[in-house]
Image (spheres, rainbow, N blue to C red):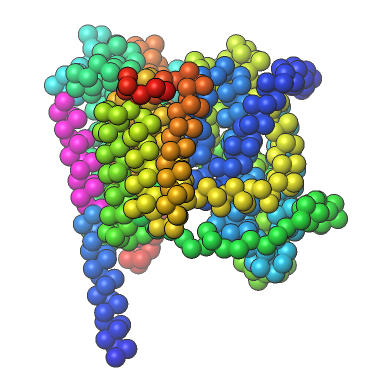
């Protein structure tokens, strides 16, 4: 039985490492791809040398992007071969954690979209309520959630108003 | 030295205005609050509070921001000791050594040692800052474009050699930051670059927005992923004020631990990229090495707390040396402070002491006063702190998001900046999964444009001759040291691999 457990544990470790490798290679490929794209943009739109045969606005970016591609290749080589300090991530990629993080991020994005329509206060009220009620793992009573959802955005709105910053608010809102 | 002393007195004179003292008190209080909040950390906390200073006059804003910085260093150890959750990374050892002491019923003892070590070390190092920063500033007036480029290049290499584990990822993170810095008009020709026709990007990426995204949004995303730690509900022992008052006999016994931590912290703080966390690790390691009873470490060794808290606060003073003297951030939090300076059109560096001595010296004077405010506040207000920390935790995420949204909007009164902050948040999150150090990204973003400008200027003045960087003495020294720092780790790897293969 313990041999089975050991085997399962080894399989799990190998799967985790495979997932980490795929994730790392994907991110490095994206960075390298973007760098390559920016090199093309750089060469098409900016001068490498100016009329005085001294470096133009395209030279420094070109050097940076070439360096980044080289670093991505180096990093990717370490990940693929499993040798070197970049070979392993300090924490395994945990998709459950990523999903939880992305849930919060998507809620932030949705709130920003909502803010275009209803302004800062209502958007943040909605965000606060949704986050505390549905996403947060901390147990808070509904009256407290309602109170916080109303008071917190209003407080921040008025603090920034005091600092002479007019946060987005629709015309129909008397703030 | 006499001149520094009289300038410092001038700084105290500026500071003695009631409003300055009030803002200093607000800054240290806010800093102590964010430093105590688990997960936020010094740099995230300072970044989140940056929007509050947007409408202020520069001298008040900078005193407040600096107060937030060293305020956070004090209180991180309180939650570390009481809740076993360090408020920021440099307070990790307060949790490792302080929490076992708390369980032994010596929580008050651990906290008072941590806070008084912070105060003593912080105050001594501010004295060193008082005399070092202007000297360094005078020396730096000799810096031309080539020297400035070489210094920034050295800072990039040094940060990458010290922060994070891997050289390639450190440089990649720098590269990402530099890439973002290149968005906007070229500093030499004024030609727009990588803006893809978006006029609003011609001014480049605002550092404050990047910082809010990279630190605040990214941090709450990571915390959401890690889930709620039930330790937050841990019952706290009641600690009386009497328990937190300093005992001079104890402090005398710990004098060498505090001295070691202070020296290590100040040096680490003054080196770009090192910072409080590295200072704490090095001082802890050194303390354990010199201890006659190293087996006590990890189970409530008070020397561990004294030395790391001394190192923490010394590093915060030390980090001001490159910031004020050279205009180069010594840590991620001073990168945020640099943003504060730039927001008000102030360029930290040697010219700050000549052009705006009122700002420079009142800032240094505020660190003395702020340290005194903090030690009194922390020792007397620990119970209130704990209550506030525990009460804020349920609505921490909405609070941070609302401040970040409001803050990023207020930078230019554009909603596009809020979206830019959200973009930085997700980019930083993905990079953090890959162990990319954020401090490198921000260093690249903040210094990238200046570095390019100085490079181009130096090359133009030398009629296209790149060897200028290796012929001028200061520039050559910095460039060769950078090359050695770059090549040495690679040489070590190659040497290790050769030995493994059995080649003589």
Let me know if residue B281 appears in the view.
no
Let me know if residue A148 appears in the view.
yes
Indicate the quadrant containing the C terminus of chain A: top left, top right, bottom left or bottom right.
top left
Using residue B451 as the reference point, say whether residue B382 is left or right of it: right
Frontmost residue, A33 versus B395:
B395
Q: Position of residue B461 (x, y in %)?
A: 39, 11
Indicate the quadrant containing the N terminus of chain A: top left, top right, bottom left or bottom right.
bottom left
Residue A29 lies within the magenta run = yes
Count of labels shown? 0
Choose top left, top right, bottom left or bottom right for residue B270. Answer: top right
Find the residue positioned furthest to the bottom. Answer: A1
Residue at horizontal 73 percent and vertical 32 percent from the top: B368
Q: Position of residue B363 (x, y in %)?
A: 65, 24
Q: Position of residue B247 (x, y in %)?
A: 83, 53
Choose top left, top right, bottom left or bottom right for residue B28. Answer: top right
Residue A100 lies within the magenta run = no
Residue at horizontal 41 percent and vertical 29 percent from the top: B406
Note whether B217 is above or below B288 in the view shown: above
Residue at horizontal 42 percent and vertical 45 percent from the top: A146
Frontmost residue, B25 versus B457:
B25
Residue at horizontal 68 percent and vertical 26 percent from the top: B22
Q: Position of residue B283 (x, y in %)?
A: 63, 53
Find the residue positioned furthest to the right. Answer: B249
Q: Main secondary structure of the magenta part?
A: helix
Q: What segment carries the magenta color?
A: A24-41
Choose top left, top right, bottom left or bottom right for residue A68. Answer: top left
Frontmost residue, A144 versus B500:
A144
Note whether A157 is above or below A12 in the view shown: above
Using residue B96 as the reference point, say whether residue B495 is left or right of it: left
């Amino acid at each position: 039985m313990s041999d089975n457990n050991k085997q399962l544990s080894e399989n799990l470790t190998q799967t985790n490492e495979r997932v980490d490798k795929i994730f790392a290679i994907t991110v490095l490929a994206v960075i390298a791809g973007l760098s390559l794209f920016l090199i093309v943009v750089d060469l098409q739109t900016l001068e490498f040398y100016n009329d005085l045969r001294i470096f133009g606005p395209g030279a420094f970016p070109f050097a940076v992007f070439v360096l980044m591609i080289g670093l991505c290749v180096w990093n990717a080589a370490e990940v693929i071969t499993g040798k070197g300090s970049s070979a392993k991530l300090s924490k395994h990629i945990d998709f459950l954690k990523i999903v939880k993080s992305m849930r919060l991020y998507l809620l932030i994005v949705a709130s920003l979209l909502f803010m275009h329509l209803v302004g800062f206060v209502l958007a943040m009220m909605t965000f606060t309520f949704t986050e505390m009620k549905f996403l947060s793992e901390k147990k808070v009573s509904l009256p407290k959630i309602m109170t916080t959802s109303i008071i917190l955005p209003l407080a921040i709105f008025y603090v920034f108003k005091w600092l002479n910053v007019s946060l987005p608010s629709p015309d129909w809102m008397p703030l | 030295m006499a001149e520094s002393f009289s300038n410092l007195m001038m700084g105290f004179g500026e500071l003695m205005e009631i409003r300055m003292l009030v803002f200093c008190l607000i800054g240290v209080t806010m800093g102590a609050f964010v430093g105590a909040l688990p997960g936020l950390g010094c740099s995230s906390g300072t970044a989140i509070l940056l929007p509050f200073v947007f409408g202020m006059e520069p001298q008040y804003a900078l005193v407040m921001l600096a107060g937030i910085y060293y305020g956070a260093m004090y209180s991180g150890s309180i939650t570390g000791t009481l809740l076993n959750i360090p408020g920021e990374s440099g307070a990790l050892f307060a949790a490792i050594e302080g929490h076992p002491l708390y369980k032994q019923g010596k929580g008050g003892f651990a906290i008072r040692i941590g806070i008084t070590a912070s105060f003593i070390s912080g105050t001594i190092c501010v004295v060193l800052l008082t005399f070092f920063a202007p000297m360094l500033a005078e020396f730096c007036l000799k810096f031309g474009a080539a020297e400035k480029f070489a210094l920034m290049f050295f800072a990039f290499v040094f940060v990458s050699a010290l922060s994070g584990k891997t050289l390639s990822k450190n440089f990649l993170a720098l590269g990402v930051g530099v890439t973002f810095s290149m968005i906007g008009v070229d500093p030499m020709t004024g030609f727009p670059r990588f803006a893809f026709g978006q006029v609003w990007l011609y001014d480049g990426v605002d550092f404050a927005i990047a910082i809010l995204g990279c630190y605040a949004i990214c941090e709450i995303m990571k915390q959401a992923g890690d889930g709620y730690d039930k330790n937050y509900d841990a019952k706290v022992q009641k600690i009386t004020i009497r328990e937190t008052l300093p005992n001079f006999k104890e402090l005398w016994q710990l004098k060498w631990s505090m001295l070691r931590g202070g020296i290590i912290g100040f040096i680490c703080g003054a080196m770009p990229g090192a910072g409080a966390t590295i200072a704490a690790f090095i001082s802890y390691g050194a303390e354990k090495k010199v201890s006659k009873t190293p087996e006590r470490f990890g189970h409530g060794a008070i020397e561990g707390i004294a030395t790391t808290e001394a190192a923490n606060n010394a590093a915060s003073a030390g980090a001001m040396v490159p910031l004020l003297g050279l205009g180069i951030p010594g840590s991620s939090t001073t990168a945020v402070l640099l943003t504060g300076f730039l927001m008000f059109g102030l360029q930290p560096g040697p010219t700050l002491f000549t052009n705006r001595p009122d700002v420079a010296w009142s800032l240094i004077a505020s660190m003395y006063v702020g340290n005194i405010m903090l030690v009194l506040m922390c020792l007397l207000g620990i119970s209130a702190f704990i209550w506030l920390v525990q009460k804020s935790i349920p609505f921490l995420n909405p609070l941070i998001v609302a401040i970040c949204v409001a803050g990023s909007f207020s930078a230019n009164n554009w909603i596009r900046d809020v979206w830019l902050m959200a973009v930085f948040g997700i980019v930083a999150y993905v990079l953090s999964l890959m162990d990319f150090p954020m401090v490198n990204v921000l260093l690249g973003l903040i210094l990238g444009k200046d570095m390019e400008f100085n490079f181009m200027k130096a090359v133009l003045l030398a009629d296209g001759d790149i060897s200028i960087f290796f012929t001028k003495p200061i520039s050559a020294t910095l460039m060769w040291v950078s090359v050695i720092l770059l090549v040495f780790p690679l040489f070590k790897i190659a040497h290790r691999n050769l030995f493994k293969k059995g080649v003589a």
